[in-house]
Image (cartoon, helix red, strand yellow):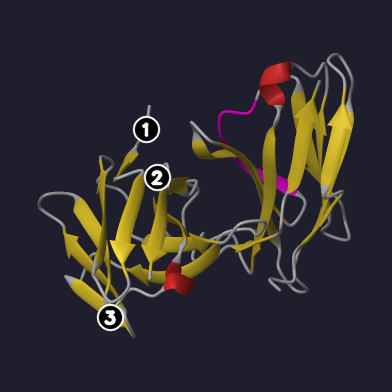
């Protein structure tokens, strides 16, 4: 059972465009929603994260939008660059508890010049 | 560099065999997580240890086992290997066990022939 559904699984965006990746979760006990970025041959690395008490968090060109009532959150990459080409994973967990971090299936982003 | 060390980087073995994957967490991190990554399943949580004790268990097969030693390094043992066990196995660590920020190693690519 996939508790975090992520789409699309692959995405091609032109340089300078906006990349948007969507995720939906089921477990209302989740209270921490990170995004991880993975380059080929490397492990995932934390990119940005949000708690459900805010609807948006921005760090540079990366923004998370969070809709608690819809149980959805998304990653927006503004002014996408070829160096952003990577696989992106959304995730959800419950901080401080014993709940595992549940990852989405991943989105392979390719930014073309 | 995340500070998490996984060995070996690559492992090729035959069906029915047993292998051990090793993980050294970041200095000071008490919690270790094991994930299995495959193309169609994304990142699947296997098991988490905190300061030597098992804290959470995911979809880990009975043929798989893990432990965390007093020096906090961890080993994942895979036995009676099957073709379907071929995957990338990641270890991650965090300061406490709160799931807030996971630091991933570069993974061990296991190929079962």
The CA distance from mark 1 to mark 3 is 27 Å
The residues colored magenta run: B53-60
Q: Do badges 1 and 2 share one subunit?
A: yes
Report in which chain the residue with disc 1 lies: A
Chain holding disc 2 = A
> Which label is found at residue B99?
none
- Judge from the rendering whether residue A2 lies leftward or rightward of residue A65; answer left or right: right
**At 68% across and 41% down in the image, what residue appears?**
B88
Q: Quadrant of the N terminus of chain B?
A: bottom right
Q: Nearer the viewer, residue A100 or A13?
A: A13
Query: How far apart are the two marked residues, 3 and 2, measured between alpha carbons?
Result: 21 Å
Question: Which residue is the site of mark 1?
Answer: A2
Q: Residues within 10 Å of mark 3 (few under 14, many from 20)?
A: some
For residue A58, which numbered disc appears in the image?
3
Q: Earlier in the sequence, mark 1 or mark 3?
A: 1
In this rendering, do the residues under marks 1 and 3 share a single chain?
yes
| Residue A43 x/y as whole percent | 63, 58
């Amino acid at each position: 059972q996939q508790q975090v559904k992520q789409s699309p699984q692959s995405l091609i965006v032109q340089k300078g465009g906006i990349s948007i990746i969507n995720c939906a979760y089921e477990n209302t006990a989740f209270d921490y929603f990170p995004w991880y970025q993975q380059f080929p041959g490397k492990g995932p690395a934390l990119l940005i994260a949000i708690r459900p008490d805010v609807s948006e968090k921005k760090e540079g060109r990366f923004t998370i939008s969070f809709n608690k009532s819809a149980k959805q959150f998304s990653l927006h990459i503004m002014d996408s660059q070829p160096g952003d080409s990577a696989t992106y994973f959304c995730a959800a967990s419950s901080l401080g508890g014993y709940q595992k971090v549940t990852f989405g299936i991943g989105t392979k982003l390719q930014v073309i010049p | 560099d995340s500070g998490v060390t996984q060995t070996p980087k690559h492992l090729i073995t035959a069906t029915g065999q047993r292998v051990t994957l090793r993980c050294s967490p970041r200095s000071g991190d008490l919690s270790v997580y094991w994930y299995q990554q495959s193309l169609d399943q994304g990142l699947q949580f296997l098991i988490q240890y905190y300061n030597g004790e098992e804290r959470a268990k995911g979809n880990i097969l009975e043929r798989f086992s893990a432990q965390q030693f007093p020096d906090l390094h961890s080993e994942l043992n895979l036995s009676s290997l099957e073709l379907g066990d071929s995957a990338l196995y990641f270890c991650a660590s965090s300061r406490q066990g709160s799931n807030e920020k996971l630091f991933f190693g570069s993974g061990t690519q296991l190929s079962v022939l």
